[in-house]
Amino acid sequence: MPFRLLNSRMVEAQVLPGQRLFSQRGAMLAYRGDVSFTPSIAGGQGGVMGMIGRRVANEATPLMTVEGHGTVMFGHGGHHCHVIELSGETLYVEADRLLAFDGTLQQGTMFMGSQGGVMGMVRGQVTGQGLFTTTLRGHGAVAVMAHGGFIELPIVPGRPVHVDPQAYVAHRGDVRNKLSTALGWREFVGRGSGEAFQLELSGSGTVYVQASEEKL
């Protein structure tokens, strides 16, 4: 795995000859060795068409390509960092949550309505994440960011996990998600819990939750 946590807010990546990483532009904090940083015009492994798709989806967070031989330290905005290792499955994550990731991973976008139908689209609006999300698929590592630290919650068949939409960071695996409501008379008279919407994730996989309801 090319990434390791230096502390809760910094990640170190090993860069080897013939390999490449992608990171958010401006996320490099320091480096050792012979390493180059160039703007990723095509926006990652998805190529030009992937870049166009992400721009249409408003998922075009600027990336840079990292190549050479050495070690690089990444961090951004003082956000908490977490490293996710993928073994062939797909990670669903917002573009602005990505700190850095292996160049071997295939990057794309997914229409929120394809997971949860109309309520999937509503979920995108409630969370402030829009109608599309970024996908990373394959074998490799991803460094993501959040407010207040992370917790990993397993999702197993027959036991869905409910998450505050504002605390949701990402998920991976064979997972379906939908927005459920808990509206009752208390919400209408202002005496409810304030948790009127919940994100329900079911299937088999993992969901990553931050210890905050603040967006990046």
Image (cartoon, rainbow, N blue to C red):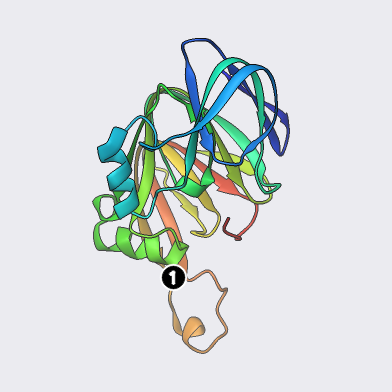
Residue occupying image coordinates x 29% and y 39%: 50
For disc 1, the neighbor class at 10 Å (few under 14, some 14 to 19, many from 20) is few
Residue lying furthest right: 7
Residue occupying image coordinates x 43% and y 66%: 126
The residue tagged with tag 1: helix, strand or loop?
Answer: loop
Residue toward you, 104 or 205: 104
Residue toward you, 209 or 83: 83
Residue occupying image coordinates x 69% and y 50%: 148
Instruction: Determine whether 187 is above or below 15 in the image.
Output: below
Residue lying furthest bottom: 189
The residue that disc 1 covers is 182
* Three-letter amino acid code at the position of disc 1: Ala
Residue toward you, 62 or 7: 62
Expressed as whole percent of the image width and height from the top left, the position of residue 124 reads 38, 60
31 with respect to 51 (left or right): right
Instruction: Determine whether 163 is above or below 158 in the image.
Output: below
Expressed as whole percent of the image width and height from the top left, the position of residue 107 reads 36, 34
The answer, for residue 1, to whether it is visible in the render is no
Expressed as whole percent of the image width and height from the top left, the position of residue 174 reads 33, 35
10 with respect to 37 (left or right): right
Expressed as whole percent of the image width and height from the top left, the position of residue 190 reads 55, 86
Residue occupying image coordinates x 52% and y 59%: 164
Looking at the image, how many numbered discs can be counted on the residues?
Answer: 1
The answer, for residue 149, to whether it is visible in the render is yes
